[in-house]
Image (tube, grey):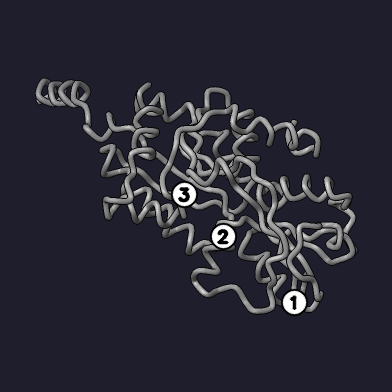
Amino acid sequence: MIALLLAAVLAGCGSSSPAADEPDPLRIGAIPDQDPEVLQRLHGTVADSLSDALGVDVEYVPVTDYAAAVSLFRTGDLDLVWFGGLTGVQARLQTPGSVPIAQRDIDADFHSVFVVNEATGLAPSDDLAPLADLRFTYGSETSTSGRLMPAWFLAEHGVDPAGFPGGPGFSGSHDATLALVASGSYQAGVLNEQVFEARKAAGEIPPSVVRYARSPAYSDYHWLLGPDAVERFGDDLPQRLTGWFTGLSADDPADAEVLDLFGAGSFVPTEAANYEQIERIGRDLGLVN
């Protein structure tokens, strides 16, 4: 009996469970720049499509704020994150070995939109100076399109980006900025143009919101891959991911769904050099160390 038990134990020690050999899921995330329901639909679709294409488990993990996305990427709890330009720079500098994967075609020529409440009486203009005397809200404090670049452009027009009456607000997201300006809680604000146009197409821009000005262009959103994922899934993972994103075609119904959700015609390869302007401005404003 003892011999049989010993044999069974030894046999068990020599066996391996297939599940033990499988890597953890590829965990994807995104900065929470829109309503949670929108983000769940968007990145849940990406997770399902990416899982089918690469033959690996992919899991979307929601986060509470921009800083959490950067922190969870740094600790390896998120592997592949849809960052804005500034948070992407922050995450890459804090996570040696991280690799930019792809950006949308529109991200190489991205814009912010300044909006005002109709009660201000302001008509659309290229002059940002009249905004200086209004109660003004940005989006998140570390949003590229909702804070960093708008602050830079305001300063170029002689407006102190921190000098609005009562100090600037920080709504937390582009959708929240629209709601606050629509209600009159703030007289003016700024958000990313892609969100504004998407809400406009959906008939969701209240009549009280006036599109006041469009910013100059800059580079913005991109996918960033962490080094832990490469260790788990192989050295070719960056190339496989870039190939999948850039291979999405509007002629394929499944691909078109992903592109439509991102408001993109296509994805294109990207590299760290594309965000040097954002890094420089971030350092000037004390948002990048």
3 or 2: tag closer to the N-terminus = 3
Q: Which residue is label 2 attached to?
A: 195
At a point 86% along the width and 52% down the height, the residue shown is 162
Question: Regarding mark 2 in the picture, which secondary structure is present there?
Answer: helix
Residue drawn at the location 75% of the way across and 39% of the way down? 287
Q: Which residue is mark 3?
A: 61
Amino acid on which disc 2 is placed? Val
Please say if the residues under marks 2 and 1 sit with CB atoms less than 8 Å apart: no
Quarter of the picture holding the N terminus? top left
Task: Give the SS element for disc 3.
Answer: loop
The residue that label 1 is drawn on is 118
Residue type, mark 3 in image: Val
Q: Is residue 213 above or below residue 231?
A: below
Q: Is 174 situated left or right of 40 in this image?
A: right
Say which residue appears at 69% left-offset and 71% top-offset.
Answer: 210
Residue 44, position in %: x, y? 39, 54
